[in-house]
Image (cartoon, rainbow, N blue to C red):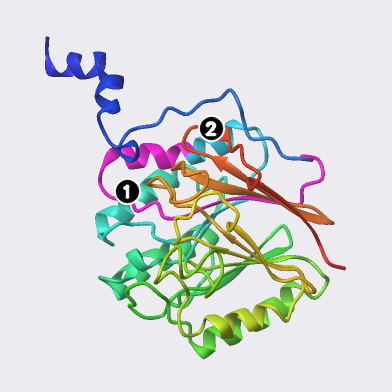
Amino acid sequence: MSAEIFITKYKAQLQALLPSSEVEYELSTENPIKFTDSENVRLSFAAIADTHFSKKEYLAHNVENCFKDIFNSGEKFDALLMAGDIAELGKKGEYKRFFQVFDTYKDKLKLFITMGNHDVRLQYGRNQKIIMNKVNEYLNIDTNRKSYYSYDVNGYTIIVIGTEKRVLEKAYISKEQIEFLRKELERATKDNKPAFVMCHQAFAFTHGLPEVWKTGDMGEQSDEVRKVMEQFKNVFFINGHLHGGVFEKTFEVLNEENGVYSLSVPGYRKPNNFGVTDLGVGYIGEVYDDKIIFKARNFVEGKNIESEFSEYIIPLKK
């Protein structure tokens, strides 16, 4: 028996011997994504984080499952939010492979990317250029070599912020970037429309920090960035980095009066640490005139997450 025939015949048994994060997952089409109200959804997106891409081909397969799951559904998705740590080591080849996978879908889906600590801690300047050049290409904008930008989809604003320096775990957010955030939120929320802000790192003392991750917060500017966000109504913050899973601290209220919230997206590449620990998990965002709905989804296998913390329905403030 040739090696090729042996591998084909015993693929399932061989994969069972590997760690769960190092196998190609089969995508089911039996339970496709369903929106709560497809006719009245105004904006829809998927949010994932921490793909930690390397040249290992099972990773490309598993990440592409997310895109396939989205388009197998028949629902109209507008955007994909990638909350940082695209790459494991920040090597050129890791980004090349990720973008090769996404390029198949670039005409169907707007891709928003923020940079994670794995993306920048070994090589900031080169990797920032690689990532922002792709953002410029996909969204047809000019970020002017900055690590932050905003873009409107269906009349709703998505703001991406990110570190401006090589930092090991946290982020550096400049005064200029904080002022950019304030101005964009002022513009985006003037008609009480919700706005979305994405950064890789979470705010300090949210989502179980520092107990769940000693170095997992945004850093020195965390309180200042949060203070700016809390001045406005209906602002939704999305982060990655914590690998927390789907559990009681995945979603938090930052400011009840103004309706400011934070969603921590589980890690995609490896099993997570708390609650539902499945890898390949992200969230679906459905935006309606009067509410936002977040639903957890196992994109790598094509199934919904069964948990009391898998769905959040948030009425919008008037």
User: Taking 91 as reference, is 287 left or right?
Assistant: right
Q: Which residues are magenta?
A: 37-65
On residue 97, the disc is 1
Residue receiving disc 2: 302
Q: Is residue 82 magenta?
A: no
Residue 315 quadrant = bottom right
Kind of residue indicated by mark 1:
Arg
Kind of residue indicated by mark 2:
Gly
Q: Is residue 46 magenta?
A: yes
Q: Position of residue 159 (x, y in %)?
A: 60, 69
User: Taking 90 as reference, is 282 left or right?
Assistant: right
User: Which callout, 1 or 2, points to the residue nearer the camera?
Assistant: 2
User: Taking 181 as reference, is 170 left or right?
Assistant: left
Please tell me how crowded label 2 is: few (under 14), some (14-19), or many (20+) other residues with Cα within 10 Å.
many
Q: CA distance from mark 1 to mark 2?
A: 22 Å
The residue positioned 81% from the left and 40% from the top of the image is 39
In the rendered image, the vertical position of residue 86 relative to residue 164, given as above or below: above
Quadrant of the image containing the N terminus:
top left
- Is 307 in front, or is 282? 307
Quadrant of the image containing the C terminus:
bottom right
Q: Position of residue 276 (x, y in %)?
A: 52, 43
The residue positioned 51% from the left and 74% from the top of the image is 148
Please tell me how crowded label 1 is: few (under 14), some (14-19), or many (20+) other residues with Cα within 10 Å.
some
- Is 270 in front, or is 36? 270
Q: Residue furthest right?
A: 318
The residue positioned 28% from the left and 27% from the top of the image is 15
The residue positioned 58% from the left and 58% from the top of the image is 249
Under tag 1, what secondary structure? helix
Q: Position of residue 128 (x, y in %)?
A: 36, 71
- Is 223 in front, or is 60? 223
Under tag 2, what secondary structure? loop
Residue 5 quadrant = top left
